[in-house]
Amino acid sequence: MNSRLEQILAEIEEYIDSCKAQPLSKGKIIVDKEEITELLTELRLKTPDEIKRYQKIIANRDAILADAQARADEILAQAQIQTNELVSEHQIMQQAYAQANEVVSIATNQAQEILDKATEDANAIRTASIEYTDNLLGNLENIVVHTLDTSKAKYDSLLSSLQECYDIVKANRGELTGAEDTESEEEASDDSAEESKSDDINLI
């Protein structure tokens, strides 16, 4: 069964895949800030619980080793009991010593094998837990970086649009100012012509 953290990561991936592409842009999407923030908040709250869960699995390594040690000690104790029983029989004393040594040797080897296997299993669990946790944090890092890149791209696009609007407004104002100057020059020229005609009439 998948953990809630894995489900949240899957939901974030599905949400990103479902987002509409930004017009005239390659690889950029339009993200609902409220929805992605809600998913990231839940992810942030769930991450410590998941890490504690895998830390608990790692802590079980000591319990596994302790159980293996107890089993090994039990085997050695049984071997010692068998040895004592064999030695107690006087008529088979020599055989008892040989069998006792063999039993102890076998029991020691079995105990060592159990300890080695338990250590190997515990280390494998620890390695897998650390790798899984690192993968989860890596996915979280990628999502955060992607979100930051998307936000920066939207911000840059907004600044670019504002700059274009500013340039257009400035150009239009320049054209209006130039047109007003031209009209003023034409009106001044017409006034001079009228004054000249008036002077001619007065001279007559």
Image (cartoon, rainbow, N blue to C red):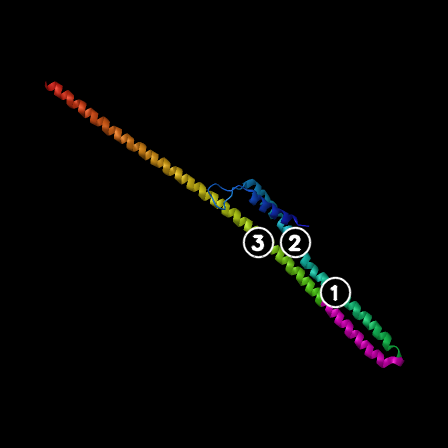
Q: Is residue 202 magenta?
A: no
Residue located beneath label 3 in the image: 138
Which structural element holds mark 1? helix
Circle 1 residue: 68
Gap in Å between the C-alphas at discs 3 and 1?
Answer: 35 Å
Q: Which mark is residue 141?
A: none
Find residue 131 and report its horizontal and vertical position in percent.
62, 58
Q: Residues within 10 Å of mark 2 (few under 14, many from 20)?
A: few
* Residue 64: image location, x then y, percent: 72, 62
Secondary element at image label 3: helix
Q: Please rate how many residues cluster around mark 3, counting C-alpha atoms within 10 Å: few if below 14, some from 14 to 19, many from 20.
A: few
Kind of element beneath mark 2: helix
Rendering quarter of residue 95:
bottom right
Residue 105, magenta (yes or no): yes
Q: In which quarter of the view is residue 158 placed?
A: top left
Q: Amino acid at mark 2?
A: Lys
Residue 153 rendering spot, x and y as whole percentages: 47, 45
Amino acid type at image mark 3 = Gly
| Looking at the image, residue 41 lies above or below residue 94 | above
Of marks 3 and 2, which one's residue comes earlier in the chain? 2
* Residue 52 disc label: 2
The tag earlier along the polypeptide, 3 or 1, is 1
Q: Residue at x 63, y 49 (%)?
A: 6
Q: Is residue 106 left or right of residue 24?
A: right
Instruction: Name the outermost residue toward the left.
Output: 204
Look at discs 2 and 1 and give the one toward the viewer: 1
At a point 71% along the width and 66% down the height, the residue shown is 117
**Which secondary structure class fits the magenta region best?**
helix
Q: Which one is in front in this view, the residue at disc 3 or the one at disc 1? A: 3
